[in-house]
Image (cartoon, rainbow, N blue to C red):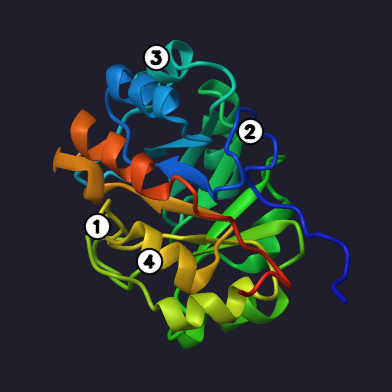
């Protein structure tokens, strides 16, 4: 027996997935790449609002891209330790559908933005323990590889074993080193609600490659999303 299904950050996305996990394509810096991701079947695209990232975009650039991408694709803003009032400004101006926190934000901030929250966590980091233990049910956790200097997009693989344990309890987004050659294996091992890809479909930071992106989605064909109580 399992309890009621917990909400996930991408539940509002529309479009046919045929049971596969949601896909978020992150690090979008060009309108053409956003539209390509949408055409491939992405549920969400991500804009990085952290100036130390090689995939960083300005609010104005993100708003222009968001306006060009089909409305059924969710717009996710990625922030690193930005104050709530700053995040809310971006939410309103782009506008954003989901807020992703990729820093050391306290879990009490989960209700501060008026949008679903996606929180990046590292199960091995003691500082993330409050999120892992006490995150509200309406926050969706994302497991990524650890890199406090780059905060994602490193191409390094996350801890699939720890991620799989979390995925038995709540909807989980798996990131970290995913590409066409390993994403099917990752989905079978972790059974995530969604996967998040960035460097694995690029030719350079922030420059998506059509062939790699299509291959990523092709590799997911036939794979099934997981969730609490859905272990094979």
Q: Which residue is mark 2?
A: 13
Give the secondary structure at mark 2: loop
Q: Residue at x 63, y 58 (%)?
A: 140
Q: CA gap, disc 3 to disc 2?
A: 20 Å
Q: Secondary structure at mark 3?
A: helix
The image position of residue 131, as x and y in percent, is: 62, 74
Q: Nearer the viewer, mark 3 or mark 4?
A: 4
Q: Position of residue 210 (x, y in %)?
A: 22, 29
The quadrant of the picture occupied by the N terminus is bottom right
Q: Nearer the viewer, mark 1 or mark 2?
A: 1
Give how far apart the Cα atoms at labels 1 and 3 are.
32 Å
How many badges with numbers are in the image?
4
Contact between labelled residues 2 and 3, with CB atoms less than 8 Å apart: no
CA gap, disc 4 and disc 2: 24 Å
The reply, left or right, for residue 198 in relation to residue 98 is left
Q: Which residue is mark 3?
A: 64
Q: Nearer the viewer, residue 221 or 24?
A: 221
Which residue does the image show at 24% across and 66% down from the upper left? 149
Question: Distance of mark 1 from mark 2, alpha carbons?
Answer: 26 Å
CA gap between label 3 and label 4 equals 36 Å
The residue carrying mark 1 is: 181
Could you tell which of marks 4 and 2 lies nearer the N-terminus? 2
Residue assigned mark 4: 185
Looking at the rendered image, the quarter that the C terminus falls into is bottom right
């Amino acid at each position: 027996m399992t309890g009621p299904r917990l909400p996930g950050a991408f539940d509002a996305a529309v479009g046919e997935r045929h049971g596969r996990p949601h896909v978020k394509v992150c690090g979008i810096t060009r309108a053409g790449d956003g539209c390509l991701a949408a055409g491939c079947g992405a549920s969400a695209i991500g804009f990085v609002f952290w100036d130390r990232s090689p995939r960083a975009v300005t609010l104005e650039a993100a708003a222009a891209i968001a306006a060009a991408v089909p409305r059924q694709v969710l717009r996710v803003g990625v922030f690193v330790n930005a104050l709530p009032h700053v995040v809310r400004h971006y939410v309103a101006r782009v506008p954003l559908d989901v807020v992703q926190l990729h820093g050391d934000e306290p879990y009490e901030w989960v209700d501060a933005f008026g949008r679903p929250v996606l929180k990046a966590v590292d199960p091995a980091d003691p500082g993330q323990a409050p999120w892992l233990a006490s995150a509200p049910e309406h926050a969706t956790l994302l497991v990524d590889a650890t890199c406090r200097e780059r905060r994602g997009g490193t191409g390094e693989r996350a801890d699939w074993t720890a991620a799989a344990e979390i995925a038995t309890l709540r909807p989980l987004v798996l990131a970290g080193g995913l590409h066409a050659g390993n994403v099917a294996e990752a989905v079978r091992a972790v059974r995530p609600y969604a996967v998040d890809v960035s460097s694995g479909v690029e030719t350079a930071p922030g420059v998506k490659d059509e062939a790699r992106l299509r291959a990523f989605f092709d590799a997911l064909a036939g794979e099934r999303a997981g969730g609490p109580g859905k272990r094979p």
